[in-house]
Image (spheres, rainbow, N blue to C red):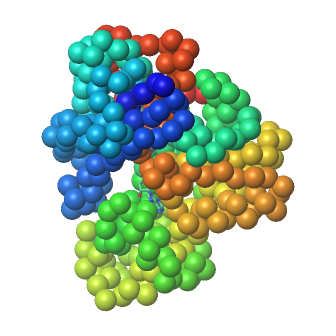
Amino acid sequence: MSYILAIETSCDETAAAVLEDGRKVLSSVVGFQWDIHRKYGGVVPELACRRHIEIIHPLTEEAIKKGGITLKDLDAIAVTSSPGLIGALLVGVSFAKALSYSLNIPLISVNHLEGHLWAIFLEKRVPRPFIALVVSGGHTNLYLVEEMGKYKLLGSTLDDAAGEAFDKVARVLGLGFPGGPAIELYGMKGNPDAVAFPRPLSKRKGFDFSFSGMKTAVLSYVRGMYNVAHVDDIPEALTGNDQFKADIAASFQQAIVDVLVSRTIGAAKNTGINRIVISGGVACNKLLRQRMKSDAGQNGMKVYIPSPQYCTDNAAMIAWVGYRYFKKGIYADLTLNPNAGTRIG
Ligand code: KG4
Ligand code: ZN
């Protein structure tokens, strides 16, 4: 039996998980910070770090306890060291280093994006190679995954990430934070064809994305309709106009899903690979899950999506990757430092 403890603090979720023999999740605990960031409509890095510091210790104890093991049973500590908010990463890396030193067990450095790429393997095996869309608050990347460590970046966003666009549009409409779930909820009551928002780069070759123009299009549309001078006044101007908000949410969601699905299917066709994995927080979106599956099905492709708890940030996915490095003897040491911007592929 081997037991890996993983720590994840790259953004606004503090997470710890215990994995047995590289496959069985004994515990996966996530501390969300929505209460802190909600009033700002987005993640405030300094506040995120402070909350990580406050809860990382009790949260890790909870993961160990729920896993039914003790610290002495651990064989290695895996930690997300990049990419992410530098201060947030620093909390997890420092904590993991201290634990690894005091328990005298290996420290393993894991890239957050690699965690998202392999999260599906916590639940299912996917034959390789496959096309992977990592779509979250910080990233919108399309990869060709050949095997562990062998990734080709096919395309990525030129500006905002898709989740960031969801968050910003929700903020404009005063729907709450995080924006993705709020837009999804409102969108259920709206008409997705009410407004034809642009689908940026749809005529351009390649597999890059651009989402900042979509947010601006929503903003211009709402300001045009309601003649609001300042963006911060929009939520108040829309008070009581729930159907309008629902129509905008549904139309925006449809536009963003169209872009994500068509680009991903395009990449699969172009490479001749008929397996698609999607992950990251935006992969929780029901419309995206349905549309990706149905469009892929029509093209003879198969789609694999983790259950929502493994789409959003979690430490179980970090443990999965960490175990693979552990088996290969690829260890970090106490000189490990976080890095805000490492890419893979
Ligand atoms: O992967 P994640 O938990 O953290 C990052 O690595 O960024 O993703 C968070 C993002 C947020 O932008 C959030 O609005 C979005 O995922 N999200 C969703 C949904 N649930 C979370 N976006 C659309 N629909 C959802 N249901
Ligand atoms: Zn993430």
Tell me which corner region of the image, top left, top right, bottom left or bottom right, holds residue 287.
bottom right
Depicted 258 relative to depicted 61: above or below: below
- Identified at 20% across, 35% down, the residue is 57
Say whether residue 13 is visible. Answer: no
Residue 153 x, y percent position in the rendering: 63, 33
Viewer-closest of 266 and 303 = 303
On the picture, is 134 further left or further right than 243?
A: right
* Ligand 2 in which quarter: top left
On the picture, is 24 further left or further right than 41?
A: right
Residue 186 x, y percent position in the rendering: 43, 77
- Where does the C terminus fall, quadrant-wise? top right
- Identified at 83% across, 41% down, the residue is 272
Viewer-closest of 154 and 328 = 328
Labels in figure, total: 0
- Identified at 42% across, 27% down, the residue is 3
Residue 116 x, y percent position in the rendering: 52, 40
Viewer-closest of 95 and 5 = 5
Say whether residue 254 is visible. Answer: yes
On the picture, is 60 further left or further right than 147?
A: left
Depicted 159 relative to depicted 92: above or below: below
Depicted 69 relative to depicted 106: above or below: below
- Identified at 52% across, 69% down, the residue is 252
